[in-house]
Image (cartoon, rainbow, N blue to C red):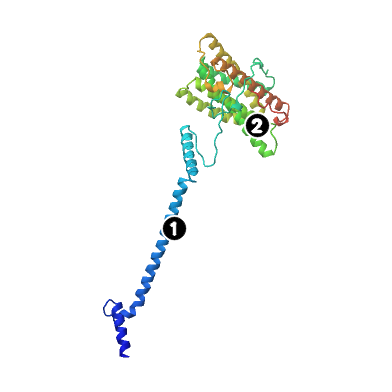
Amino acid sequence: MKRFVSGSLARGLISRGGGYMSTAEMMARPARMQGVMMNKQQSQRYYYWSRMMSSVAEKSKEVGNGGGVEAIKEEEKQKIEKNGDEEKGMVNSYWGLSRPSIKRPDGTDWPWNCFMPWDSYEADLSIDLTKHHVPKKFLDKFAYRTVKLLRIPTDLFFKRRYGCRAMMLETVAAVPGMVGGMLLHLRSLRKFQQSGGWIKALLEEAENERMHLMTMVELVQPKWYERLLVLTVQGVFFNGFFAVYLLSPKLAHRIVGYLEEEAIHSYTEYLKDIDSGAIENVPAPAIAIDYWKLPKDATLKDVIIVIRADEAHHRDVNHFAADIQFQGKELREAPAPLGYH
């Protein structure tokens, strides 16, 4: 027994490095061993985690040097395209909406966003400019005299400044087609009826008149008081014409027909001043050349001639619309003259 106790003490001293182990220390030894084991497990986890991250990094490096080059090139290409679009003034959109590349017949880029090549056309210059609807009925006479009264303040204000006069005229002339097309659109929705193409025909007229204005603005830079006059006249005319069209569409179309007759007269006087040298026959704006497919060396006179032809076509369309309704029919009962400029 003595030999067993002596051997145990000797082994304890050796394991403690020659020190003495108390009973409390012997009790606490399992807890310390558990802590050592936990630290060892954490060290192993950290070791495996670091090995895993280093291997991922190596693979990423290999992909970047090999198969990932294509992805990097694609990303750089997208950045270059984006910067190029920003330099061109194009808007990058999440929705993927962008204008396709459009060329002129000569191969140069199409410069306009307000109209496309398929919207341009060659004006029909063979149209009769002298046609006139003789007022016979009461509404005809009312429409005719109303237009003549509206011409008086215009003559007094602009006199023979036909550039400014044309600009003002086009701000008014572009209103009836929009108002008529809008009201016919709403009526078609309410009554579940086709319009016979008249909605599109009237909106085409409004767009054509707006392009006249865009052309005239390139030729005549309006002064501040002329811009103020445009705001006033447009506000009054829009609301007035809107009310007239609601009450009597045939009267509204007849008024527009007579307005277009006055426009033909005004542009004819404009041409007389160009021919006499009172107004310089400057080169045509680029927008006019592309819109009416004019020759590259076209002049102001060429532009006024095609605009006057457009006004003659609008005269015919509106007098025709009024005639349909004076016969007791609806516009949808007669095919609309689509594409009739």
Residue visible at 45% across and 49% down in the picture = 62
Quick one: label 1, few (<14), some, or many (20+) residues within 10 Å? few
For residue 110, what is the image quadrant? top right
Q: Is residue 169 visible?
A: no
Q: CA distance from mark 2 to mark 1?
A: 69 Å
Q: Which residue is mark 2?
A: 199
Residue visible at 29% across and 83% down in the picture = 9
Q: Position of residue 329 (x, y in %)?
A: 73, 29
Residue visible at 51% across and 23% down in the picture = 217
Q: Find out whether the residues at labels 2 and 1 contact each other: C-beta distance under 8 Å.
A: no
Q: Nearer the viewer, residue 137 or 67?
A: 67
Q: Is residue 107 left or right of residue 36?
A: right
Q: Position of residue 339 (x, y in %)?
A: 65, 26
Instruction: In the rendered view, tell whether residue 133 sits above or below residue 45.
Output: above
- Number of residue marks: 2
Residue visible at 34% across and 74% down in the picture = 32
Q: Which of the marked residues, 2 or 1, is nearer the chain's N terminus?
A: 1
Task: Give the SS element for disc 1.
Answer: helix
Q: Which residue is mark 1?
A: 52
Q: Position of residue 261 (x, y in %)?
A: 62, 18
Q: Nearer the viewer, residue 104 or 139?
A: 104
* The furthest residue to the bottom: 1
For residue 44, what is the image quadrant? bottom left
Q: Is residue 119 left or right of residue 194?
A: left
Q: Amino acid at mark 2?
A: Ile
Q: Amino acid at mark 1?
A: Met
Q: Position of residue 309 (x, y in %)?
A: 62, 18
